[in-house]
Amino acid sequence: MHSMKSLGIFLIWRLLPLLLWCVFIFSLSSKSSLPGDNLGPIDYIFRKLAHMGTYFVLFYLAFRLFPGWKLKDRVLFAVIFAFGYAVSDEMHQGYVPGRTGTPRDWWFDGLGISFGALRVFGLL
């Protein structure tokens, strides 16, 4: 009985938010265009900050998935998961009409992930 309750808590409070965030990212990446396309430099800055923030959150949700793990193992898992998802997201965008997957966007995703890792280690 206790293990079923623990499994339910894990699924609802740990795994579900991560999966929902992945679906959120995928749904945004599936749109041919987003509101405010081509509004100049402010739009560019906002979009890159959005990449960073989105993947900072993804890192954090992956990081909190296994609270019993050692800190460095949790960070390593979260970094690998988030970077892997970022790469797959950019590849996915390459198949969406009107969108392109770029290494530059992946770099900004990586900055958000890196900030998450630095934050966990208390360096940011």
Image: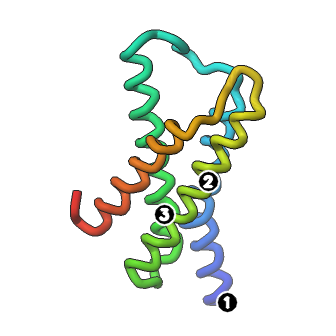
- The residue shown at (39%, 48%) is 111
Q: Are marks 3 and 1 in contact (CB under 8 Å)?
A: no
Left or right: residue 71 versus residue 63 is left
Q: Judging from the image, what secondary structure is the residue with disc 1 in?
A: loop
Residue 116 is situated, as x and y percent measured from the top left of the image, at: 37, 57
Q: Which mark is residue 1?
A: 1
Indicate the secondary structure of the residue bearing disc 3. Answer: helix
Q: Is residue 98 above or below residue 81?
A: above
> Callout 3 environment at 10 Å: few (<14), some (14 to 19), or many (20+)?
many
| Residue drawn at 64 percent across, 73 percent down | 8
Left or right: residue 26 versus residue 116 is right
Of marks 3 and 1, which one's residue comes earlier in the chain? 1
Residue that label 3 marks = 79
* Number of numbered tags placed on the structure image: 3
Residue 67: which quarter of the image? bottom left
The local crowd at label 1, few if under 14, some if 14 to 19, many if 20 or more residues have their Cα within 10 Å, is few
Q: Amino acid at mark 2?
A: Tyr
Question: What distance separates the C-alpha of mark 3 from that of mark 1?
Answer: 33 Å
Outermost residue toward the top in this view:
39
Is 104 placed above or below 41 here?
below
The crowd level at tag 2 (other Cα within 10 Å; few <14, some 14-19, many 20+) is some
Question: Identity of the amino acid at label 3?
Answer: Val
Q: Which residue is mark 2?
A: 85
Q: Earlier in the sequence, mark 1 or mark 2?
A: 1
